[in-house]
């Protein structure tokens, strides 16, 4: 019939049925992070499983902590019959659940099978998404269902398809089974298909043979499940089993042949003589291929009355009567989302190893023969090296079409397959070996043969590869060229491999080359298999978006910045008594109202203009919440959270009220506006008087964040209420993950736009990713804060046996009574041991010693988890080598401290022979130059609009002591680090500015904070970045480190009104309709004067693409001395000529407005971004704005 590719029977397919990830060197943590490589994009990778379905309630498939489903997903969730055993929810043979959990299962602690293999288990890509296509049932899988599954998977938008099933061997043609057809079309759509090779165990029995599929053989690990047989003479014989049954006494053993025949029918217990069998151990033979037949045999032996069973396994396959690659493919896809299926396949194949853990050649089970490529393909997969293969063998759909032509397809058959106008007649003639496959097989070498391959550089832009050949026996192999040199990433090079028969080899051979930038391996006489390895020398809707989860960006700080630590935060010469009329809204995790930081003693009545509520929760319950004259409002938001967190409902929520259960909200609120607390301390550390920046300001709480995160629907509702209630400032210590989406694809950008339009300043945190371009909360109407350090440290000294002291950082106040031996974690296991498994440590080696561990994870909590497991293993103490060098003082549950990599190496050099003591932590000041930009603080440039500088300003965010919720660890105060802590510092100062200048707009307050910031530390040296000491740029610290005194008198400001932000939106592509939907008024872009992004009156100038010359205009308003003069002083970016006109601005009145232009001209094009500044010096004030230019 027209359009039919091929007609074939609806055949039945068989399911090809993990200590595996740790065996391969992949860390067993919750996110499968690889040190030095970011695989956090897993959550955007969708893996489709065509199998027997899945058991959604399994802990391996819980969605705790996972962000919303990717927008591109187009699939369905067929729920079956509701309220029946078939009911299914998205978030029965078991095979599908097993395969899916191996590839993409979440971390499950204490995973076990009847007490065997107990430990933490997870899939290779535990944060990847799973899409289930149940095409297999209890009696098998049929082609019609498999084809339909492939079709849906392709349409739904999966990235990888896992198919742990296949045809029986020998396999028919490529288009006589559904898997070959479905995988061809999947590959043509950029979807990698990973399949199993089959379980026949015989030469030539592999199936799923199409070159566009990645076909996987099975290997062993170093874990066995053993059961010993104890003979009467005391001899022990080791067997393999999953049986945990106990025998109370020894019994007689008899052969099955005594009761019947050795190969008795496994499904008939009647074939055994029960009189002979009862109470004895029966010895049986097993030669069937089926795993189930072993179980059936044991059931019949038990039914016959035997006490036990010994099975003589004639296959010797070491199966202890019980699919890794899709997980690794998902990790590769997360790191390299643009790679084609063949590129991923190439990376997996070419980085595989042919050596076992003892560096010996891999052998086959059970005979111990050296494995050939026909046994293991390119080798045993390496999940670390695969992420950075250096070069790849790429192939496109057109190449597979050429392959089909080369094996005999004509124009008609090719057209029926592809559905397009592709032909073979107009295609250059090619051989099967022309396919750019990452292996070379010449099955019939006559005398000489030439094969061409093409490689693409995906590693270091400038790299060189040298060919090293291990030729098949009797074959001369020449590679041309022998050296490949790349100059650029993505560069393509071609080489040829020439084969010439010298002496025809009589048998299969595979030579090893242990060090090989290019190795070619050979095989049989008439077939030569050569795997290739290379290594480097609706109306009214503003926008519709998922209800995304937002992350919380987690005080010797005020005195460090020069703000007096008194109860009212009075500034000499300036009155800030109006604080009590400033209302600050906090969108966070709530607040602990009983904290001394929030008492209302001495505060006047609540301002009459306040329109907010105090939602009290359930009275006389732990959730009960009360407001006072300090905390004047409290609301909570659950709809978004409960929608996304599914069936957890209110049962998993500690406090259904504005009460804080996590501590974060209490901490941030007290930093900004906490009352004076005397003797504030954390376990004796940082003791002193502490308070917020605006201690008399009012607090309104909007609890939109819960223990599992903050969702957009709740955040939007919180903004809406805060605006309606009458707050003056909104503090938001949370944000989207980077890279951030558009300004109107997240609640914070939308909510802050409407807040700013109502005259409310929104202060936000920049994020804690610590990488270039990772800053979030990028909208110009927000004030975005980076984190800096102070001059206070919490240190713990390590005393070595020779009297040397090494300083570490810690919050541990535990005492050690004596010095003990120090050992490296590598002696007990591995340096990067899984922090969730104390079982990964050898307790005998660890007990009573100090363990030196490495830490490369981003998570602060994992440090605590690691210390808990070190203590559980019996260690006396812990030294953590912090490879990030972020100076975050960590909590430990035993004597412990963190040190940098350099000091860590020094400690490790002593460990073999010395005793060491860790002293309790104490507080010191002045040890380090300060401030610096914290290592974890997210950096610019702005990934959405490079013309807008982000972050805007820096404030203290490292090791900040503030209020806490005793519901979390029974503490009233805590020390935390993060831009979450930096944000409320700026919020507090913004409240002071608002109290002094109540009529100022949000942009005026923002301008004052930015232009009075400093780029010098306390020693008048340029501020640097942590940990490398590099000079900080505006991408690190924005305009500089906030100055809480100068900000109150900036002299002149850069003001902007809501109309200016509307013009900004027009300049970045908004049209009349989209602008109207945002503003809700009659604003248009078509009747607005055309402007560029740089026209926004921002207190910084960024020109991200300077061609030759560029002119920028700015307007300043006098808010200082009515009669004042300011002179421009320029520090030009390197290679750029900067001219300011006029150079002198003279004001005659308060509120007068003046305009100036800044002209940029390229003299000598600088590499990358160049940085400078423009300062305006007056008699009473000085302000500075950053200049950022890229040619």
Image: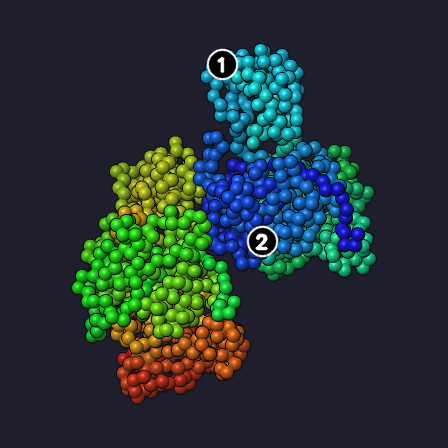
Residue 949 figure quarter? bottom left
The image shows residue 359 at horizontal and vertical percentages of 57, 37
Circle 2 or circle 1, nearest the eye: 2
Q: Can you say whether 960 is above or below 1183 in the image? A: above
Is 79 displayed left or right of 496 in the figure? left
Q: Can you say whether 172 is above or below 424 in the image? A: above
Residue 1005 figure quarter? bottom left
The image shows residue 922 at horizontal and vertical percentages of 26, 50
Q: Residue at left 33%, top 35%?
A: 848
Pointer 1 local density, CA inside 10 Å: few below 14, some 14–19, many at least 20: few
For the residue pair 911 and 970, the one nearer the viewer reads as: 970
For the residue pair 714 and 432, the one nearer the viewer reads as: 714
Pointer 2 local density, CA inside 10 Å: few below 14, some 14–19, many at least 20: some
Residue picked out by circle 1: 250
Residue 505 figure quarter? top right
Q: Residue at left 62%, top 59%?
A: 490
Is 623 displayed left or right of 226 in the figure? left
The image shows residue 831 at horizontal and vertical percentages of 44, 42
**Which numbered marker is on residue 618?**
none
Q: Residue at left 60%, top 59%?
A: 489
**Which numbered marker is on residue 75?**
2
The image shows residue 646 at horizontal and vertical percentages of 45, 50
Q: Can you say whether 606 is above or below 1151 in the image? A: above
- Circle 1 sits in a helix, a strand or a loop, which is it? loop
Q: CA distance from mark 2 to mark 1?
A: 58 Å
Q: Is residue 648 visible?
A: yes
For the residue pair 377 and 287, the one nearer the viewer reads as: 287
């Amino acid at each position: 019939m027209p359009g039919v590719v091929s007609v074939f029977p609806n055949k039945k397919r068989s399911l090809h049925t993990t200590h595996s990830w740790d065996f391969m060197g992949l860390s067993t943590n919750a996110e499968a992070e690889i040190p030095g490589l970011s695989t956090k994009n897993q959550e955007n990778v969708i893996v489709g499983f065509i199998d027997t379905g899945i058991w959604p309630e399994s802990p391996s498939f819980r969605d705790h902590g996972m962000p919303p489903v990717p927008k591109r997903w187009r699939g369905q969730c067929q729920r079956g019959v509701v309220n029946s055993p078939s009911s299914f929810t998205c978030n029965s043979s078991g095979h599908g659940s097993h395969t899916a959990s191996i590839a993409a299962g979440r971390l499950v602690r204490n995973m076990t099978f009847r007490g065997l293999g107990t430990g933490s288990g997870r899939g290779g890509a535990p944060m990847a998404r799973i899409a289930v296509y149940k095409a297999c049932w209890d009696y098998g899988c049929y082609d019609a269902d498999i084809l339909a599954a492939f079709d849906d998977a392709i349409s739904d938008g999966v990235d990888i398809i896992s198919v742990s099933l296949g045809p029986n061997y020998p396999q028919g043609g490529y288009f006589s089974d559904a898997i070959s057809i479905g995988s061809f079309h999947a590959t043509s759509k950029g979807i990698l298909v990973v399949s199993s090779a089959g379980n026949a165990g015989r030469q030539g029995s592999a199936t799923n043979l199409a070159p566009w599929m990645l076909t996987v053989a099975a290997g062993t690990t170093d874990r066995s499940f053993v059961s010993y047989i104890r003979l009467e003479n005391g001899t022990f014989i080791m067997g393999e089993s999953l049986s945990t049954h106990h025998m109370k006494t020894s019994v007689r053993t008899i052969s099955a042949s005594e009761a019947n025949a050795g190969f008795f029918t496994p499904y008939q217990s009647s074939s055994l003589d029960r009189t002979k069998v009862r109470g004895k151990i029966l010895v049986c033979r097993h030669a069937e291929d089926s795993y189930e037949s072993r179980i059936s045999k044991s059931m019949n032996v038990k039914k016959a009355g035997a006490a036990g069973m010994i099975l003589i396994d004639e296959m010797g396959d070491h199966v202890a009567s019980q699919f890794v690659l899709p997980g690794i493919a998902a990790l590769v896809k997360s790191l390299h989302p643009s790679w084609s299926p063949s590129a991923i396949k190439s990376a997996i194949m070419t980085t595989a190893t042919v050596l076992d853990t003892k560096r010996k050649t891999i052998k086959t089970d059970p005979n111990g023969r050296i494995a050939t490529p026909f046994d293991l393909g390119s080798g045993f997969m390496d999940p670390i090296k695969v992420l950075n293969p250096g070069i790849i063998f790429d192939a496109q759909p057109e190449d597979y079409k050429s392959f089909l032509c080369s094996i005999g397809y004509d124009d008609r058959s090719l057209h029926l397959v592809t559905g397009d106008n592709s032909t073979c007649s107009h295609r250059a003639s090619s051989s099967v070996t022309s396919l750019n496959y990452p292996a070379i097989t010449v099955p019939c070498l006559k005398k000489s043969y030439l094969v061409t391959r093409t490689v693409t550089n995906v590693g270091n832009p400038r790299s060189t590869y040298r060919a090293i050949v291990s030729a098949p026996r009797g074959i001369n192999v020449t590679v041309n060229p022998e050296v490949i040199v790349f100059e650029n990433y993505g560069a393509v090079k071609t080489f040829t491999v020439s084969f010439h028969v010298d002496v025809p080899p009589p048998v299969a051979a595979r030579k090893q080359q242990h060090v090989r930038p290019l190795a070619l391996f050979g095989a049989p006489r008439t077939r030569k298999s050569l795997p290739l390895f290379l290594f480097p020398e609706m109306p009214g809707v503003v926008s519709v978006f998922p209800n995304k989860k937002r992350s919380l960006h987690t005080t010797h700080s005020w005195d460090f910045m020069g703000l007096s630590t008194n109860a009212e935060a009075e500034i000499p010469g300036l009155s800030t008594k109006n604080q009590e009329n400033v209302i600050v809204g906090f969108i966070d995790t709530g607040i602990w109202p009983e904290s001394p930081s929030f008492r209302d003693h001495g505060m006047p009545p609540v301002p009459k203009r306040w329109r907010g509520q105090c939602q009290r929760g359930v009275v006389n319950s732990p959730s009960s919440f009360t407001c006072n004259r300090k905390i004047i409002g409290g609301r909570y938001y659950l709809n978004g959270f409960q929608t996304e967190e599914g069936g957890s409902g209110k049962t998993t929520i500690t406090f259904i009220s504005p009460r804080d259960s996590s501590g974060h909200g209490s901490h941030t609120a007290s930093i900004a506006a906490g009352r004076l607390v005397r003797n504030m301390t954390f376990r004796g550390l940082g003791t002193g008087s502490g308070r917020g920046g605006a201690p008399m300001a009012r607090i309104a709480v909007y609890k939109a964040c819960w223990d599992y995160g903050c969702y957009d629907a709740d955040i939007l509702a919180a903004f809406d209420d805060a605006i309606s209630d009458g707050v003056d400032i909104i503090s938001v210590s949370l944000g989207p993950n980077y890279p951030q989406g558009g300004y109107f694809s997240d609640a914070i950008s939308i909510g802050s736009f409407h807040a700013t339009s109502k005259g409310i300043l929104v202060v936000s945190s920049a994020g804690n990713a610590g990488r270039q371009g990772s800053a979030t909360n990028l909208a110009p109407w927000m004030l975005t804060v980076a984190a800096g350090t102070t001059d206070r440290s919490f240190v713990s000294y390590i005393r070595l046996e020779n009297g040397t002291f090494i300083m570490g950082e810690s919050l541990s106040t535990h005492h050690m009574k004596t010095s003990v031996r120090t050992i490296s974690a590598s002696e007990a296991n591995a340096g990067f041991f899984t922090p969730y498994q104390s079982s990964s440590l050898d307790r005998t080696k660890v007990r009573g010693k100090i363990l030196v561990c490495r830490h490369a994870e981003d998570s602060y909590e994992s440090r605590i988890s690691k210390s808990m497991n070190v203590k559980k293993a019996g260690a006396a103490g812990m030294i953590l080598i912090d490879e990030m060098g972020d100076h975050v003082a960590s909590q430990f549950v035993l004597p412990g401290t963190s040190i940098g990599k350099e000091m860590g190496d020094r400690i490790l050099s002593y460990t073999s022979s010395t005793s060491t003591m860790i002293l309790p932590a104490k507080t010191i000041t002045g040890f380090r130059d300060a401030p610096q930009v914290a290592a974890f603080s997210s950096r610019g440039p702005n990934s959405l609009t490079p013309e807008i500088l982000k972050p805007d300003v820096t404030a203290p965010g490292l090791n900040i002591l503030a209020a806490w919720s005793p519901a979390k660890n029974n503490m009233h105060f805590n020390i935390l680090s993060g831009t979450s802590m930096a944000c409320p510092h700026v919020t507090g100062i913004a409240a002071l500015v608002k109290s002094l200048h109540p009529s100022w707009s949000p942009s005026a307050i923002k301008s004052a904070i930015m232009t009075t910031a400093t780029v010098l530390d306390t020693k008048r040296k340029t501020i640097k970045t942590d940990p490398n000491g590099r000079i900080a740029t505006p991408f690190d610290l924005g305009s500089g480190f906030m100055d809480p005194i100068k900000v109150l008198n900036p002299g002149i400001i850069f003001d902007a009104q809501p109309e200016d932000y509307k013009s900004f939106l027009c300049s970045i592509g908004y049209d009349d309709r989209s602008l109207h939907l945002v503003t809700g008024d009659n604003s248009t872009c078509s009747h607005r004067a055309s402007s560029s992004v740089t026209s926004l009156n921002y207190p910084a100038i960024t020109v991200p693409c300077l061609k030759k010359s560029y002119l920028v205009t700015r307007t300043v308003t006098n808010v200082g001395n009515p009669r004042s003069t300011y002179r421009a002083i320029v520090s030009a970016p390197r290679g750029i000529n900067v001219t300011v006109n006029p150079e002198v601005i003279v004001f005659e009145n308060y509120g007068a407005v003046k305009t100036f232009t800044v002209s940029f001209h390229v003299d000598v094009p600088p590499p990358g971004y160049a940085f400078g500044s423009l300062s305006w010096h007056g008699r009473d004030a000085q302000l500075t704005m950053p200049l950022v230019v890229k040619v």
